[in-house]
Image: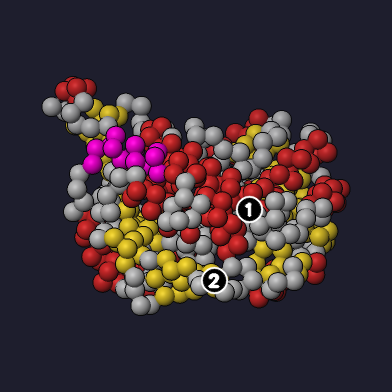
Amino acid sequence: MTRPALLDALGPAGPFRSRRRTPVTDVTGRTVAELCLVPPMFVGRAANALRRAEPMTQDAVVSAISTAGKSFSTDAIGGITAEEHALRVARVSGLPIGVVRAATRNVAAAAANVYRDVQQARPVTAVTEWRDPLTRTGRAVWCRRGDVLGVLAAGNHPAVHTGWLQALALGYRVALRPSQREPFTPYRLVTALRGAGLGTDRLVLLPTDHDTAREILRNADLGLVYGSAQVVEAHARDSRVLPQGPGRSKVLLTAEVDWREYVDVIVESVSSEAGTACTNATAVLVEGDPGPLAEALADRLSKLPALPPEDEHAALPVQSMTRARALQAYVQGRSTGIPWLGVQDMLVDLGDGSAALRPLIHQLDAPDPGQLGAEMPFPCVWVAPWSRRDGIEPLRDTLVLTAITRDDDLVDDLVAEPTIRSIHLGPRPTHTSVPEMPHDGFLAEFLMRTKGVIR
């Protein structure tokens, strides 16, 4: 029997092996690793070391990030090949292995283009340092808001680890708390960055329990926190913390378009990334009768195969049977309307203690914002009627809105609505992404500020 892997904390003095550990289990409930947890005192000492970090030029940091991204996606790190890593992540997260491989490529691409990506947010008249000749006549200088960023990462998708790479490129030192559910991606990425020349005093991996996680934020200048709606609410009034919560992404089709031409776009919006990303659509609003569209979606989504996550054809997320049944019970309590794909059929027993999560589609009588905002970690979509009388209210609090409409006045209203953070017009899936278009603002908008300098 293979012994569980032991994942150390990665502190400023190197690997740290603590006596307190927590198991990392795969989708069958089998322990595949033990994650060392650091105590609060270790967090404070690590933060102090980050503040005393040896200087590195931005060119050196960016070069190390680029090198590490390539290594992360192709090399054996700590004796684990890229394919072995993908298999481990798939087995513990329940994501299809194809999704994990694509996320690995996305991390490598983000690392290769990190300098370009952070510059997207810089004001066009701002310069990057006070020595720039333009400051002789007065200019804005783009400056960090602090020195240390604390990151409480999520484990639902490996791509969440692209963001804090930008903080490193901007000169921040990063204290990263990995998810206990899926710590393999951050452990591999931090190891790759250190191997590429990034100092151990610029990036630390600090696995902690939930109480000690607060110490990371307390010792940092700024924080990036991933979590539920409750987590977002807890940090909503703290200007030092940027919470990243549920996406509640949506698709809107108005009466002048024929929805039958856009079924592919809607299916992709709901089911890409196995339905686990914040950019997956969880609501579809139709001006008119939503029944025929709900039926068409049910026909398409019901054909997604229920397979173990390591299968090349897997398309749905997998969880342990215990977790899957708890999620089924939770969804059962929230389900209303007509079940085109219902809760009773959402679990597929894979015979090894795990279950694949099949799509759910419920048709609502009205665009109730509370029901439309119920986001699940698998393909789950609420289809509802919408009319001009309903207005913007059902579309608020949306990360990405794909609006398939020819009504420019409506588009004006959607763009003006501050709680809709990204708008895709026409047949563009909700997960569409390009470097010049942030899906929730540029991270550097939070990390940086402009300071007037004249000399």
Q: Could you tell me the amino acid type at mark 1?
A: Ile
State which region is magenta: 56-68
Q: Earlier in the sequence, mark 1 or mark 2?
A: 2
Q: Reply above or below: 316 against 113.
A: below
The residue drawn where x is 43% and y is 36% is 112
User: Is 117 within the magenta?
Assistant: no
Given residues 299 and 440, the one toward you in this image is 299
Q: Reply above or below: 339 against 449.
A: below
**Marks 1/2: CA–CA distance:** 21 Å
Which residue is outermost to the left? Answer: 455
* Image quarter of the C terminus: top left
Quarter residue 413 falls in: top right
User: Is 59 within the magenta?
Assistant: yes
Tag 1 residue:
97
Give the dominant element type of the magenta stretch: helix, strand or loop: helix
Quarter residue 10 falls in: bottom left
Can residue 232 be seen? Answer: no
Which disc, if any, is residue 2?
2
Q: Could you tell me the amino acid type at mark 2?
A: Thr
Would you say 412 lies left or right of 357 here?
left
